[in-house]
Image (spheres, helix red, strand yellow):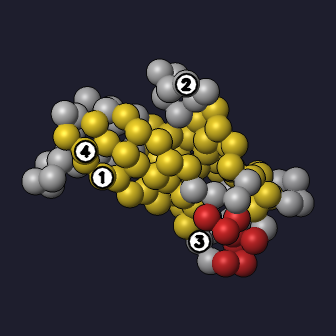
Amino acid sequence: MQTSASANLNIRIQQDQKYHGDDWWSWSIWIEGDDDELDRIEKVVYQLHRSFPDPVRTVTQRKSKFKLSAEGWGVFTIYARVQTHDGSACKLSHELELRYDDGSMTTA
């Protein structure tokens, strides 16, 4: 969900996840949008839950769509500040979803 659009970007955060058992998942998030939109981005600063080591993480790899991968056991809101090459920025947020193999969601 885009919460501020000062950079006038039509982008959103996408995710994937894989359950490994024992209430543990690997997951990734990235910025989804048209190539022209992604080319305007210089970096994305992600804010993870404070329980993560180094909860503020900066990604500059355009080729990966500014993908961030991590592992964990709980759901939370991920915040992102998207900085463009022209100095403007926008803020995004995403509710991380973690699903068991049967499709049910974790609430922890």
Residue under label 2:
53
- In space, the residues marked 1 and 2 are separated at their CA atoms by 21 Å
Q: Which amino acid does label 2 sit on?
A: Pro
Q: In this view, does 6 lie to the left or right of 69?
A: right
- In space, the residues marked 4 and 1 are separated at their CA atoms by 6 Å
- In space, the residues marked 3 and 1 are separated at their CA atoms by 23 Å
Q: What residue type is labelled 3?
A: Gly
Which label's residue is closer to the chain start, 1 or 2?
Answer: 1
Residue under label 4:
20
- In space, the residues marked 4 and 3 are separated at their CA atoms by 29 Å
**Contact, mark 2 vs mark 4 (Cβ under 8 Å):** no
Residue 107 visible in image: no
For image coordinates 31% across by 42% down, the residue present is 25
Q: How many residues crowd around disc 1 within 10 Å: few (fewer than 14), some, or many (20 or more)?
A: some
**Contact, mark 4 vs mark 1 (Cβ under 8 Å):** yes
For image coordinates 47% across by 42% down, the residue present is 70
- Dot 2 falls on a residue whose secondary structure is loop
- Nearest to viewer (mark 2 / mark 4): 4
x and y percent of residue 43 in the render? 74, 53
Extreme residue toward the right, this view: 86
Q: Which mark is residue 18?
A: 1
x and y percent of residue 84 in the render? 80, 58
**Contact, mark 3 vs mark 2 (Cβ under 8 Å):** no
Q: How many residues crowd around disc 2 within 10 Å: few (fewer than 14), some, or many (20 or more)?
A: few
- Nearest to viewer (mark 4 / mark 3): 4
Q: Is residue 32 above or below residue 101?
A: below
Q: Residue 33 carries which label?
A: 3
- Dot 3 falls on a residue whose secondary structure is loop
For image coordinates 58% across by 29% down, the residue present is 55
Q: Is residue 108 left or right of residue 103?
A: right
Which quadrant, please, contains the C terminus? top left
- Nearest to viewer (mark 3 / mark 2): 2
